[in-house]
Image (cartoon, rainbow, N blue to C red):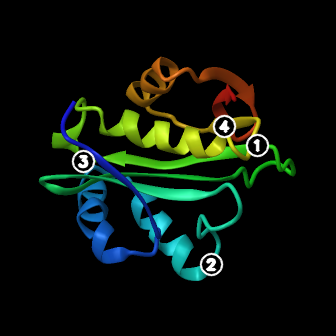
Amino acid sequence: MAQTTISKVSAGDTPLLAELKEESGNEGYSFVDRAIEEWRIGVNRFDRPGEGFFVADADAGTVGMCGLSHDPYLNDSTVGRLRHLYVAPEMRRHGFGRSLVLACLELAGKHFERVRLRTLELDASAFYEIMGFKLVDEPDATHSIDL
């Protein structure tokens, strides 16, 4: 695994996330931009108890991000939501995604009983299953992990 530093930051730190925003946009993903915009308008700032927004840094700078929030699709304070996991293409398969998810799950374990997420990408689905998430047939979620 490459040298990784995981830090809890603000999703509104657009200079920090600018390169990820551009790279993800080039890949056709809008969720990095959405994370920044939702922070800007106050929809999700990852600042409620149990929430956090993390970035992965390497010699190349900020190479990944991931957030943990209360699940907005459920009225259940015991369920968190993994959101906006993104790792720059050239930094994938070096442990950054794993480190980001583990940071979120460590925080989640102190506040939630379960964490859900949604992905439509086959590679992402396989990654989450390796991380211990199970496929679920639930509205607004494809995977879940009990903590």
Cα separation, mark 1 vs mark 2, equals 21 Å
Between disc 3 and disc 1, whose residue precedes?
A: 1
Q: Secondary structure at mark 2?
A: loop
Residue farthest toward the left in the current orientation of the protein: 59
Q: Residue at x 70, y 45 (%)?
A: 80
Residue 42's disc is: 2
Name the residue tied to disc 3: 88
Name the residue tied to disc 4: 116
Mark 3 in CB contact with mark 2 (< 8 angstroms) = no
Cα separation, mark 4 vs mark 2, equals 22 Å
The answer to whether 108 appears left or right of 20 in the picture is right
Q: Residue at x 47, y 38 (%)?
A: 101
Cα separation, mark 1 vs mark 4, equals 7 Å
Mark 1 in CB contact with mark 2 (< 8 angstroms) = no
Q: Tag 1: Cα neighbours inside 10 Å, few (<14), some, or many (≥20)?
A: many
Mark 4 in CB contact with mark 2 (< 8 angstroms) = no
Residue 79's disc is: 1
